[in-house]
Image (spheres, coloured by chain):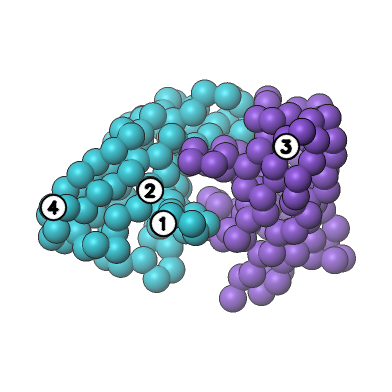
Chain colours: A purple, B cyan
Amino acid sequence: EVHLLESGGGLVQPGGSLRLSCAASGFTFSRYAMNWVRQAPGKGLDWVSGISSSGGYTFYADSVKGRFTISRDNSKNTLYLQTDSLRAEDTAVYYCAKENNSPDSWGQGTLVTVSS
Amino acid sequence: QAGLTQPPSVSKGLRQTATLTCTGNSNNVGNQGAAWLQQHQGHPPKLLFYRNNDRASGISERFSASRPGNTASLTITGLQPEDEADYYCSAWDSSLSAWVFGGGTKLTVL
């Protein structure tokens, strides 16, 4: 059974940084692209970033380009999202999602709150 | 980034049929197909259909998906109380090199 567990969220001041992690199990992590998708309170789903299975290709939403960095460690079955220069509008639950043609498995999410 | 267009809400009666729509363009839905996800309040999204209209594992046959042109559709027959949820469509946009989502449709079962 696929299991994705996000961690690293919390309360951070505007301009601050957080490193989110997503520990994967139940599948061969190195074979699948992975994505981060966020959901602001009471709002819809918003794709943030994606990374190819090998880590050689990365993709970002315009809203986070230059501020967020996605990476992965296939030896540790872990996906990361380094979030820098955080803004109030980045406040959201951040989900990691396994990609198999479509985002087919999701974690429970980790809450990031950007506030002074 | 431009998203996909979904009606904000749909209301139908118990045991009726609901059809939800998702409109994109030739760079996303029309070319790549759309996935459908269901999200109950306080839970993460769950995949219903892959972009090629394959039903995800464990999804009831009361759910079906189609994609005529740039608009994808999700049909739910014999509506049950547990079908009340938010439904999102998603597609890979080849011109943006990005996943795009619809704004979501809140389905109410009366």
Chain of the residue that carries numbered disc 4 in the rendered image:
B
* Crowd around label 3: few <14 · some 14–19 · many ≥20 (10 Å): many
**What residue did someone put label 3 on?**
A114
**What kind of residue is marked 1?**
His
Numbered disc in front, either 2 or 3: 3
Instruction: Say if labels 2 and 3 share a chain.
Output: no
Instruction: Say if labels 1 and 3 share a chain.
Output: no
Chain of the residue that carries numbered disc 2 in the rendered image:
B
- Reply above or below: A19 against A60: below
Quarter holding the N terminus of chain B? top right
**What kind of residue is marked 4?**
Gly
Q: Residue furthest front?
A: A116
Chain of the residue that carries numbered disc 3 in the rendered image:
A
- SS at circle 1: loop
Q: Are marks 2 and 1 in contact (CB under 8 Å)?
A: yes
Distance Cα–Cα, label 4 vs label 2? 16 Å
Q: Quadrant of residue B105?
A: top left
Name the side, left or right, on which B81 lies relative to A97: left
**What residue did someone put label 4 on?**
B13
Distance Cα–Cα, label 1 vs label 4? 18 Å
